[in-house]
């Protein structure tokens, strides 16, 4: 499976879940559960004078457009009086106002005061899920099940599967205990399968098959089985299983969506056809439309993708992502001013907010508006203090890229005065010094990091690679890169460095092995330049040309590829 297919599959998965408050790692969204019908109003009881006054204030606050005051008073009095009616009313107001904390407090109180109310129990369960208190949510879901209502085990499990391991472990033990009492409960089996899907896909698949043995038509279990096959990288089997299910239920939307997503890992044109058909059948489903747009974008069908993303601007849940990709399209068309307008619209909280911010800063600096970029950095840092350092480092990287490393060093010097041991700032300044050809200062900053973090593989690699390419200290460079490789032997950048230092030491066959491994793990134009050079020196010109061609396809106009080919007096392949 190619890295490109892996990337787009991840994007589609993100697109299909971006509109939800919580991630949905379960094979497909759990079927929606209707809330029980509201219970009849309970008779009121007399309240103390202070309580009546507080309730009167709440009533008038609500009528005068101050719902927060009304909610605070109602909830406070519900807690003090332990009145069922007030607890229910507080829950309803909190949910209308989307006040999650108050809604949870009120719902739990209502369920506690009126344990016979199925409505209270249902709402308390959903509020616990929203609060990510999954262990408690599972217990409440079990209460629903024991009362003969549809439980929310699958919803709880799917939401919890990306949470802390401690919660998953407790929930798995609880589900197993219930299964010991009732091993034929297909929903309990499937919920446990969902929880184990990421860490133990084989066990997850076995549980799903147990559920399917009880009910062969149980789609939720079948979806877990397919997802487990995907986790085990058995894509052909996953595709075959989905095809079998679709033959039985050709109009099942969940199955069709899962098949389209699976094909994004295998065959993008087929995935496009599936999403196009789904979009035609469900034109109001914006999540499907977004996935369709992403598949078009990845296949470079720019005009068609632009049309879909533009339509998605009309919907709040897809607004930010659509703006981000419209910005990317404009950048590909060399229209930075148009792109800037789109990137400005990507909202905080969206997964593309920071990437969009990076593009905004980069555009300003590329166009010679460095002070505007710094102003953007400062305003953003005030608004999002937790991201301040990332904003700074991104700005520094752009300044370095466009030949303004002096300004980068100046900004980082100021930051390091406040936090002199910050390894991220030191590393950023080291990269800025490298752009100035100030290798001694760069080495000093990198060694300062290594004093506190001697096993930092990335820093060891950066220092080793710099010494290998910018000095005559090849053996010292080899020792540093070798140590980095022992610490992180799967990092493509470190593998590339191992290949290059071996090449510089004259070990061409060893270099070839490392560089092929790096290129397979992470196709990149710089790795292609190195691999092509080794092949060229080994007299394998056609292979070198092919690798360089691949590098140009990955990065048209690559300077390092052009420099390498010119230095070797080789023929530049046509991109």
Image (cartoon, helix red, strand yellow):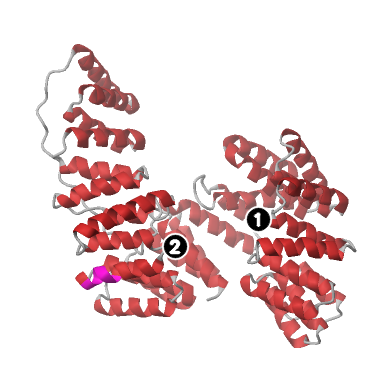
Residue plotted at (65% across, 55% down): 336
Q: In the shown orientation, is residue 4 left or right of residue 76?
A: right
**Of the pair 566 and 363, the residue shown nearer to us:** 566
Q: Which residue is mark 2?
A: 13
Q: In the shown orientation, is residue 201 left or right of residue 556?
A: left
Q: Which residue is mark 1?
A: 336
Would residue 221 be counted in the magenta stretch?
no
Q: Position of residue 507 (x, y in %)?
A: 81, 77
Query: Mark 2, mark 1: which one is toward the viewer?
Result: 2
Residue plotted at (89% across, 61% down): 471
**Which of the image's four quarters has the C terminus?**
bottom right
Q: In the shown orientation, is residue 223 left or right of residue 43?
A: right
Q: In the displayed structure, would residue 179 be above or below residue 1?
A: above
Q: Residues within 10 Å of mark 1 (few under 14, many from 20)?
A: many
Q: Which residues are magenta?
A: 209-213
Mark 1 secondary-structure assignment = helix
Would residue 211 be counted in the magenta stretch?
yes
Q: In the displayed structure, would residue 249 be above or below residue 473?
A: below
């Amino acid at each position: 499976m190619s890295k490109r297919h892996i990337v787009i599959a991840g994007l589609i998965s993100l697109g299909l879940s971006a509109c939800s408050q919580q991630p949905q790692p379960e094979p497909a969204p759990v079927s929606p559960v209707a809330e029980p019908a509201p219970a009849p109003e309970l008779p009121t009881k007399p309240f103390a004078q202070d309580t009546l006054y507080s309730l009167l204030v709440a009533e008038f606050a609500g009528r005068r457009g101050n719902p927060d005051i009304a909610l605070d008073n109602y909830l406070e009095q519900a807690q003090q009086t332990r009145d069922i009616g007030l607890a229910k009313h507080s829950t309803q107001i909190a949910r209308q106002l989307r006040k999650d904390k108050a809604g949870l407090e009120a719902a739990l109180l209502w369920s506690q005061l009126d344990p016979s109310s199925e409505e209270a129990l249902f709402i308390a369960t959903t509020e616990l899920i929203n609060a990510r208190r999954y262990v408690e949510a599972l217990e409440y879901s079990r209460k629903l099940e024991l009362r003969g209502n549809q439980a929310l085990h699958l919803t709880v499990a799917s939401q919890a599967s990306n949470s802390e391991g401690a919660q998953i472990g407790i929930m798995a033990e609880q589900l197993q205990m219930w299964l010991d009492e009732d091993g034929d409960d297909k929903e309990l089996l499937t919920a446990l399968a969902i929880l184990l899907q990421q860490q133990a896909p084989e066990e997850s698949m076995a549980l799903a098959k147990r559920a399917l043995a009880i009910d062969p038509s149980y789609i939720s279990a079948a979806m877990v089985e397919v997802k487990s096959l995907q986790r085990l990288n058995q894509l052909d089997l996953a595709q075959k299983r989905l095809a079998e299910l679709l033959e039985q239920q050709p109009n099942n939307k969940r199955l069709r969506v899962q098949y389209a997503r699976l094909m994004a890992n295998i065959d993008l044109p087929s995935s496009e056809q599936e999403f196009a058909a789904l979009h035609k059948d469900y034109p109001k489903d914006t999540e499907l439309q977004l996935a369709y747009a992403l598949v078009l974008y990845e296949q470079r069908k720019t005009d068609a993708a632009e049309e879909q993303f533009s339509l998605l601007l009309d919907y709040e849940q897809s607004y930010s992502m659509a703006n981000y990709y419209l910005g990317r399209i404009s950048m590909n068309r060399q229209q930075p001013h148009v792109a800037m307008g789109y990137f400005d619209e990507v909202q905080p909280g969206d997964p593309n907010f920071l990437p969009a911010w990076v593009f905004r800063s980069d555009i300003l600096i590329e166009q010679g508006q460095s002070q505007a970029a710094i102003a953007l950095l400062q305003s953003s840092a005030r608004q999002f203090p937790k991201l301040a350092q990332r904003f700074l480092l991104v700005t520094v990287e752009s300044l370095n890229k466009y030949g303004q490393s002096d300004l980068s060093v100046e900004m980082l010097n100021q930051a390091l005065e406040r936090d002199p041991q910050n390894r991220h700032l030191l590393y950023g300044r080291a990269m800025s010094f490298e752009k100035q050809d100030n290798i001694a200062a760069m080495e000093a900053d990198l060694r300062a990091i290594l004093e506190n973090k001697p096993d930092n593989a990335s820093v060891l690699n950066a220092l080793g690679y710099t010494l290998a390419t910018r000095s005559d200290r090849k053996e010292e460079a080899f020792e540093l890169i070798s140590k980095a490789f022992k610490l992180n032997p799967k990092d493509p950048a470190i593998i590339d460095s191992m290949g290059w230092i071996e090449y510089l030491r004259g070990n061409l066959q060893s270099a070839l092995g490392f560089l092929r491994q790096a290129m397979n793990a992470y196709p990149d134009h710089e790795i292609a330049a190195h691999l092509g050079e080794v092949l060229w020196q080994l007299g394998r010109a056609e292979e070198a040309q092919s690798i360089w061609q691949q590098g140009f396809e990955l990065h048209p106009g690559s300077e390092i590829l052009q420099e390498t080919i010119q230095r070797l007096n080789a023929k530049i392949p046509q991109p």
